Image (cartoon, rainbow, N blue to C red):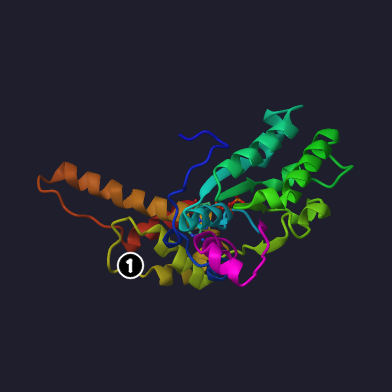
Amino acid sequence: SRREGFSTIPNVRWDDVGGLHLLRQEFDRYIVRRIKYPEAYEEFGVDLETGFLLYGPPGCGKTLIAKAVANEAGANFIHIKGPELLNKYVGESELAVRTIFGRARTCSPCILFFDEVDALTTKRGKEGGWVVERLLNQLLIELDGADQRRGVYVIGATNRPEVMDRALLRPGRFGKLLYVPLPTPDERGLILKALSRKKPLDASVDLFAIGRNQSCENLSGADLAALMNEAAMAALDEKQKSADSTSNSVRLTIKLRHFEQALEKLS
Ligand code: ATP
């Protein structure tokens, strides 16, 4: 496994992301094409935000999208978990912030992703005290060094945008706010489709019908991933049972009944 805070190009592609088309369009304009065709942006004198905050309910694809953006742009990706940054380097977290931005600059173009960024940025004077305060100030210094930040794009993710220090949401910092909603019924179908991309799904299965089903109401992308996994497990169980009882190996696929079993199990 890769160590936290080090850069790699992620293997998540847009194809792995179900729905969220508007977000994809935004990131194409703001990051992907800007990295791929910098001359065009320069020629037209387009100056766009480089800092983003993805907010919304858990498990709806914030991390996934950030990774897909990096992959599509051919950019490095550095994943920082807010709470770890705060706890692992107590007393040294300012240095850690400086180091992280330095590392991002040396491997630019780079997406610097701050997961659970609210942990670092709780409103001043509230919980956390001076550790958060100093960390936050260092973060602001680094974010404002935009001139030296060329090719480094910063994406934060949070389920609790309301607790974040307002100063962080100004332009040039995490300046562009993007909402990542729970999927609609049709988007649930798209997510299931993306999740089944590399699985032996039976041709008879209508993933959009499953997505529109009452029992999938309010499920997040992460919930749908769990559903897909359970359905695949149910199919695999069956395959292994039949392999034990017959000599010729049968090709078993994931069928509607496996999704029904999975839904029952998860409900
Ligand atoms: P959290 O706020 O809990 O960190 P998140 O919004 O960052 O959640 P992700 O980590 O991106 O959510 O999603 C968790 C998992 O759920 C993904 O790895 C993927 O399997 C699945 N998932 C979520 N949203 C989608 C989506 N739009 N398309 C495909 N899979 C998704």
Local SS, label 1: loop
Q: Is residue 108 positioned above or below 172 on the image?
A: above
Q: Is mark 1 within 8 Å of ligand 1?
A: no
Image quarter of residue 34 = bottom right
Q: Residue at x 76, y 50 (%)?
A: 144
Residue 58 drawn above or below residue 119: below
Q: Which amino acid type is shown beneath numbered disc 1?
A: Val
* Quadrant holding the N terminus: top left
The residue at 68%/48% (across/down) is 148
Q: Residue 180 placed where, x, y %?
A: 62, 62
Furthest toward the left, the residue is: 247
Q: Which residue is mark 1?
A: 205
Which range is magenta?
A: 26-54
Q: State the image coordinates of residue 89 (x, y, percent, origin top left).
A: 70, 28
| Residue closest to the eye, 135 or 180 | 135
Residue 147 or 190: which is nearer the viewer?
Answer: 147
Lateral position of residue 73 relative to residue 96, left or right:
left
Q: Position of residue 136 (x, y in %)?
A: 79, 42
Q: Residue at x 74, y 42 (%)?
A: 120
Is 40 rendered above or below residue 142?
below
Whether 256 is among the magenta residues is: no
- Label 1 crowd (10 A; few <14 / some 14-19 / many >=20): some
Using residue 196 as the reference point, say whether residue 37 is left or right of it.
right
Q: Position of residue 262 (x, y in %)?
A: 41, 54
